[in-house]
Image (spheres, rainbow, N blue to C red):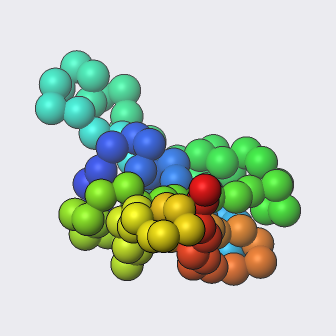
Amino acid sequence: MMGIGGFEEGVMAAVAAKALGAVAEARGWCAEAKVCAKYRETWKIDDLVPGKKEDLFISISSITGDNKWFDLQPVLEKEAGHEVSTLTVSEDGVNIEKRIHH
């Protein structure tokens, strides 16, 4: 994955990459030259995510219908409750699960 995003999105991508045994690098960026000068180094995956691979877990659920990044349905109202689709990433792989919450 490559792109410009917020800090939180970058860390989530790095956690997912490390959990799956992939490689990740990141660089900080800012529109202000003084601030940007502090972020010239490239951070390796262990700089971004110092935890052990087996301890990493990402969980993402889409609340609304305008989800352009993940192929997840928004929360749907069903007779038995609300159906929530959740994408998880861990050392066990990538999983999408749907559950009804009462």
**Quadrant in the picture for the N terminus:** bottom left
**Quarter of the view holding residue 59:** bottom right
Q: Is residue 26 above or below residue 87?
A: above
Q: Residue at x 37, y 34 (%)?
A: 39
Quadrant of the drawing holding the C terminus = bottom right
Name above or below for residue 89 compared with residue 58.
below
Q: Nearer the viewer, residue 36 or 74?
A: 74
The front one of 58 and 63 is: 63
Tell me the residue at 38%/56% (across/down): 63
Q: Say which of 5 and 33 sits in front.
A: 5
Residue 96 coordinates in the image, percent (x, y): 57, 78
The residue most toward the top is 34
Indicate the position of residue 49 as horizontal and vertical percent values.
66, 48
Compared to residue 92, the image places residue 3 above or below, namely above
Q: In this orientation, does residue 87 appear?
A: no
Q: Position of residue 65 (x, y in %)?
A: 26, 65
Residue that appears at 16% across and 25% down: 32
Q: Quadrant of residue 97?
A: bottom right
Count of picture labels: 0
Q: Judge by depth and name the residue closer to the eye, 20 or 79.
A: 79
Vertical position of residue 23 compared to residue 53: above or below: below
Q: Position of residue 4 (x, y in %)?
A: 26, 54
Determine if residue 27 is in view. yes
44 left or right of 54? left
Q: Is residue 64 left or right of residue 10?
A: left
